Amino acid sequence: MRNAPLFRERPMALRILTGGVVPIVFGAVTGIVLGVSAAGYWAMQLIALAGGVGAGFEHPDGWEGADRGLVGGALFGTALLVAHAVVGTHAQVSLPSFAPILAVFTAIIGMFAGALGGRLRRAAIERDRPGATARAGEPTT
């Protein structure tokens, strides 16, 4: 996965799909599940978190991953709230009294998840780079 193409190297249509459509659709489905099952909602939140880390891995470092995660998290959270409002079911988990703040929370969490993914990619590349220096106390090969 370290050699996966960077997000910016992918075709525009694929960037729109993975960077915009996927978070919106997954957020909308999560918003529907919010009115059905608390366990399903939290499971989908964990999947979204893993997706944010994976999306960050498509960037060369944590900074670009954070940017992607911020946007993806905001799209996800907004779609979640809109879909939940459209369906009109009672939320199975407590939402903040000012529900739109949830989109801000998902954006911030997405930013950290994307940053983690970008940092993991950078660390993997640096670790595999020929001539990488060993840490103090580690044998060199």
Image: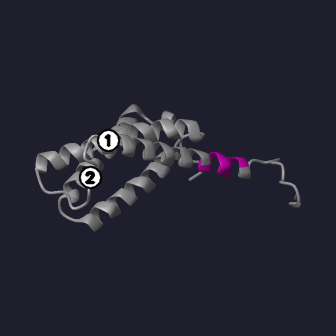
Viewport quadrant of the C terminus: bottom right
Crowd rating for badge 1 (residues with CA inside 10 Å; few <14, some 14–19, many 20+): some
Q: On residue 101, which mark appears? A: 1
The quadrant where residue 69 appears: top left
Question: Is 124 in the magenta?
Answer: yes
Q: On the image, which quarter does residue 110 sit in?
A: top left
Q: Is 15 left or right of 120, judged from the image as shown? A: left
Q: Secondary structure at mark 2?
A: loop
**Amino acid at pointer 2:** Leu
Residue 91 visible, this angle: yes
Residue 14 lies, in percent from the top left, at: 38, 39
According to the image, label 2 marks what residue? 95
User: Which residues fall within the magenta stretch?
Assistant: 120-126
Kind of residue indicated by mark 1 = Ile
Q: Is residue 33 above or below residue 123?
A: below
Of 118 and 140, the residue lying toward us: 118
Decide which of tag 2 and tag 1 comes sooner along the chain: 2
Q: Secondary structure at mark 1?
A: helix
What percent of the width, then of the height, locates residue 8?
A: 50, 33
> 22 and 30: which one is in front?
30
